[in-house]
Structures are given as C-alpha cells and as structure tokens.
Image: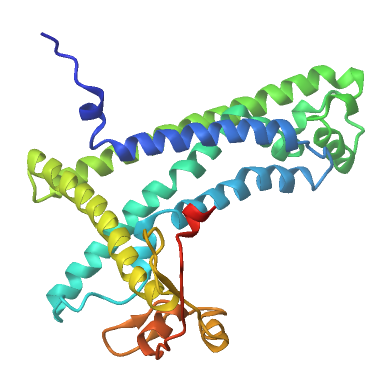
Amino acid sequence: MTFLPKWPAFLKGKEVVIANAIIAILTIGGQQLFSFFTFSCPCHVGQNLIYGLAFLGVPALILLVVGYALNNQTWRLVTGKRSPLQAEGTQNQLLQCKLTCFVLCSITGRALVAPVTWLAVTLINGSYYVCAMSEYVSVYYYGTNPNVTASDRKKILAAFPCSQLVPPELSRARDEVILLLRYQSQVAGWLLIAVVVITVFLSYCLASCFSPLSFLHFRYWTSYVHNEQELFDEATDQHSKLYAIQHIRKFFGFVPGSENVGEIRIPSLREWQAISGLAFLKLVDEEHYDYSLLHDWALKGSVDRKYLKLDEDPVTAT
C-alpha cells in the first residue's frame, strides 16, 4: 500500500501554478540569452542610464503587455456586450463592478509573472544596474586625485563597466564601484522577490477568507469551471464544423470526406466573386450574424443546378 499521490491527480487543479512556473523558467532562460547576445554597455556619460534602464524596463513592459494579450479573460472582459441575463439595478451594478475588479486583479497577477521574473533576474545579475548607475557613484570611489573636474569624473565613472577603458591606476577603484553596484542591485532583486511572494501569499489568504465557499466546495467549483470550458470548446468545434458543412455542401455539392460522390456542383463566376474578398462579421438581425462571405451566400444566394455527374470514383480511377 502506497501513500504517494498519483501525479495526474496531484497536478489537477494546479494548472495555474504550473503555468506560472513554466513562464518564469522560460523568462529566466530568455533573459540569460538576451544578456549574453545583445547587452553591451556604451560606457558613456548620459547613455549608460538610458541603455541600462531600457534593458531593465522595456522587455518587462513588453512581457506585461503580452501577458495581458495571451489571457483569455482579458478578451472576455473587453469584448462584446454585457449579458442580457443580468438585470438592471444598483445592487447588480455594484456586484458587476466587484466582479470586474476581481477579474482585473486576477489577469494582472498572471500578467506580472514574466515581467517581475525578468526584473528580479536582471537585478540579481547586476549587469544592467551597474551600467545604468556607474556614473552616479559617490565621489569617494573615484580615487585620490582632487584636481579632476566633475564632468571628467563622470566620464571616468561611466567607463567603469568597460574594464578595457579604465586606466590601470584606477582598477582598484573600479572593482570597488562594481562590487558596490552589484550589491545594491542584488539586494533590490531579492527585496522585489520577497515583496512579490508576500503579496501573493497575502492575496490568496484574503481571497480565501472572503470566499463564500468552503475549501472542498471551492475545489469542486474550480473543477467544474475547468471541465465546462473543455466541453464547451469541444462542442464549439463540433457545432461550427457541422454548421460549416451545410454551407460547403450547398456551394460544392458534396462534403469533404464523403464516399461515393455521385456529382459535384460547378460554382459560377459570380458565386466565386461573392465568397471571395475580405470577410467581416455582419449583423443580419438583432439575434444573428453572418460569420463569413460563404455563410452570407449560403443563407441568401439562390442555388442553380449546374452539377457535373461523376462516372467513377476519382480515387479508384487513379
């Protein structure tokens, strides 16, 4: 008798955690490759800060936008109209507002996984921060020569991330500056990780405290929503395929995959023109849409009897 859980059963209901872990691992790998192949500090006054912050912030911003775009809940929230089943009323509007805020927080939490991982890894690595902040280090780390002007001092400090540009007599000062900046960057990275972990944990705790469902009821509800979505996707695929078959049969005279096709329909030039071009969702009435040009033709076009009889099955003939 074993007490080890079966892996499929153990992983069920943890799809979000697994997906977030995969996203974080892919982001870490991408950051390492990105840094190795593309990052090269300019080591010039005024450019280091822009370059370093761009490598820190721009990829994180792109990952955030992609995280929003890849979440189906985002498009469910912004697409279409409010359900007509929801009655009007102040209480219902308040409930709808709370639900919208909850969904937004959930979407944002999922979308922040990749950018926060990027920021944390880059800060722990330290290269971007060293490049961005080298020219702003305290005067003490320049050296012992007091005759250097402030602008020259900034130029020398800005060159510290590039060891080949630093004079030999300043190599020790450079090492101290790099160590200081890496220390600051890594501390900031670990603080970011700690803040995110604590925030996520407290958010889950608060959500569980205010949930109207018990622990087992919540697990049942999660399983139900997951299964419903899977079955709905399967039904959508099958329903749309069966619906499209009717329009394909009307245009060509047969259904793809049919055996023993006795005749095929020859569409006219006007019919080919009617189903070609750019298709837009077209409102037919208050309840129905035309999904494509072929759909519109099949519902409104008159079908002539231009059929070609087949003497033999073309498959067996070959």
| Spot occupied by residue 229 in the image (x, y as percentages of width and height) | 25, 53
45 relative position to 90: left or right: right
Q: Residue at x 26, y 50 (%)?
A: 230
Q: Residue at x 48, y 54 (%)?
A: 315
| 200 lies above or below 83 | above
Residue 134 figure quarter:
top right
The quarter in which the N terminus is drawn is top left
83 relative position to 73: left or right: left
| 308 lies above or below 180 | below
Residue 255 figure quarter:
bottom left
62 relative position to 233: left or right: right
Tell which of 41 and 147 is nearer to you.
41
Q: Residue at x 44, y 42 (%)?
A: 113
| 68 lies above or below 165 | below
155 relative position to 132: left or right: right
| Spot occupied by residue 144 in the image (x, y as percentages of width and height) | 85, 23
Residue 34 figure quarter:
top right
Tell which of 194 and 149 is nearer to you.
194
* Residue 283 visible in the picture: yes
Tell which of 238 and 132 is nearer to you.
238
Picture colour scheme: rainbow
Give the number of callouts.
Answer: 0
Q: Residue at x 23, y 34 (%)?
A: 12
| Spot occupied by residue 123 in the image (x, y as percentages of width and height) | 58, 33
* Residue 188 visible in the picture: no
Residue sitting farthest toward the top: 1
Tell which of 303 and 170 is nearer to you.
303
